[in-house]
Image (cartoon, grey):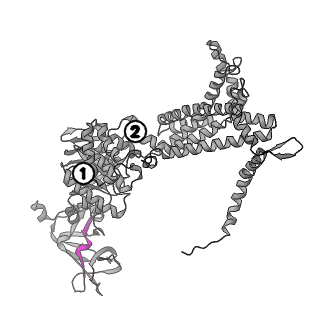
Amino acid sequence: MDKTYNNKAWLLVIPVFLLVALSAIIPIMTVVNYSVQDTFGGNKFFWVGTEWFTDVLRSERFHDALGRNLLFSFIILCIEIPLGILIALSMPKKGIWVPICLVLMALPLLIPWNVVGTIWQIFGRADIGLLGHTMAALGIDYNYSSNVFDAWATIIIMDVWHWTSLVVLLCYAGLVSIPEAYYQAARIDGASKWSVFRYIQLPKMQGVLIIAFLLRFMDSFMIYTEPFVLTGGGPGNSTTFLSIDLVKQAIGQFDLGPAAAMSLVYQLIVLLVCYVFFTVMSNVGTDKPEVEE
Amino acid sequence: MAQITLDKLAHSYLPNPKTDHDFALKELDYAWDDGGAYALLGPSGCGKTTLLNIISGLLVPSNGQILFDGKDVTNLQPEQRNIAQVFQFPVIYDTMTVRQNLEFPLKNRKVPNDEISKRVSEMIDILDLSEKADRKARGLTADEKQKISLGRGLVRYDVNAILFDEPLTVIDPHMKWQLRTKLKDLHRQFGHTMIYVTHDQTEALTFADKVVVMYEGEVVQIGTPEELFDEPKHTFVGYFIGSPGMNILPAEVSGNQAKLGNHTVTLKGAYPDLAGKIELGIRPEFLTLTNSESGIPAQINGVEDIGRFKIVRASIEGVELNVVLNEGENIPAEPKLIFDSTRINIYQDDHLVRSLENEKGI
């Protein structure tokens, strides 16, 4: 086999390399650089090794924020994925209602994060907001700025309202791509509605569900704007998620070193969780896990 | 197992069909014998899948009735009709193993467990899938998957009929032949009524005892492969069956003579006076090229050697026709065409006309 090696091909990779360098590698290396140094100002830095990482991993503040993040993402996924599947299943498959439903579904996705936050912030106020006012009129004590449960409920509902559509659209795309013959074969085999869902629709949606899962996990794990706009992380620290804490440390207190260490740990957690999700979910239903007997 | 009767069956996809043209399937009366192997043959869009879906119950016909053993099932759902269908693309349940796939239709019908495992194990052996029985079905090849979808029908011993909708489309050519042989074996073994939709004449002619040829929503001929070859009832059947298809030449017929332009051909018998579009049909296999005095002078336009025989593209006074020459036969220098009189069919407006003697015989 005479393969021609032509090193000129590397030239073609340069543009991509430059782009990735500017957009990812250089910024990340800057953060890495900060995370292993300390400064007393005046642009003078000195080496501290892994000290900041040890600090971050031991800090209670970090543990609390991480716990909140995990809990939030968990709740969000538990609501949005099943709800999204359910809505996608009940959407029409043909006719005039298809485009109407799709547009309605896409609407929340077009609204920027901070606008969503502002909408709900005003919506929930007892003095001028429709929701807050109605709740007060019904005698329900609802106040997101003083009650932890109310604050969480508001953020969760906000996120569900904003992002369930994404899951719906992805699932819908998966559903409409199932050939009619599958449903016909299922009818001939006498399958129940549940069996059709369990053995045809769900397996065929696996690919898009993985994407929906990953997107929703990453996005919800990085939640920042909504709690920031709603309560700024309060009441107390109850909605201070990692991102909010990070911004407080980096820009509020200007502790570059600890903030850099924290953001690297944060990123590694996201990568790790995504990797685990992806591996587990892509192997569901294949032979792989069962081979090891 | 059952006899399937189509009673004045017709179907249109339009809400208010008016003319004949609006019907995807034109009115049809036919009884499919219990245990027969049938093929529905026709080009794409001729209505064969429509007919199949009506039989399976996936589609409710707009006119007429369908009866299983004399019982009206027109409005019954597919699951109530007890039929099996194999689709163009293999339909399997990805997340289940081969065994679970075969168990599925029985479980849904609440068959007792020991009965299920007995039948499924048997079926796995019959389909030669024993090595892969406990593998997930998604990793199998197309022909294995198609066997599973067939097996899901066969495990139900009592199915009224097994319907095939172009089941070999996605199968590799060398596997097609094997799978087809398997189908014939299974037919012999179980004796189910089988209806096989295809646009491939080889598949239809090798699989079926009786072939139903469809053209533009109409059944143009139902017959054994031999009948379709020897006496196509419609010019379409003539072209469609055979490779190359029948030569159809414009002609004038009087008595036992047919005139092709300035030349005359003798027919096997006398015909009544015919009006309309009259054509003479003869298969390329029954034409000979000679050097002799008699015969019609032909012009040779080209020769295709396809191994066992040669196809000669010839023309008589500008009308093109094909002649089949056996390997080794040569094309004469001044070729004359000889028609085998006993093999000539006459068509009036595309439909076969019999000679007077033949008519009396029937």
Front residue (pair A112, B38)? A112
Residue matched to label 2: A196
**A25 or B321, which is in the foreground?**
A25
Amino acid on which the number 1 mark rests in the picture: Met
Marks 1/2 same chain: no
Tell me: B16 left or right of B68.
Answer: right
Q: Are marks 1 and 2 in contact (CB under 8 Å)?
A: no
Q: Residue at x 33, y 81 (%)?
A: B299
Q: Is residue B31 above or below residue B258?
A: above
Quarter of the rendering occupied by the C terminus of chain B: bottom left
| Snapshot quadrant of residue B156 | top left
What residue do we see at 22% from left, 86% from top?
Answer: B292
* 10 Å crowding of disc 1: few (<14), some (14-19), many (20+): many
User: Disc 1 sits on a residue from what chain?
Assistant: B
Residue B194's disc number: 1
* Helix, strand or loop at mark 1: strand
Q: Which residues are magenta?
A: B276-294
Q: Position of residue B15 (x, y in %)?
A: 37, 40
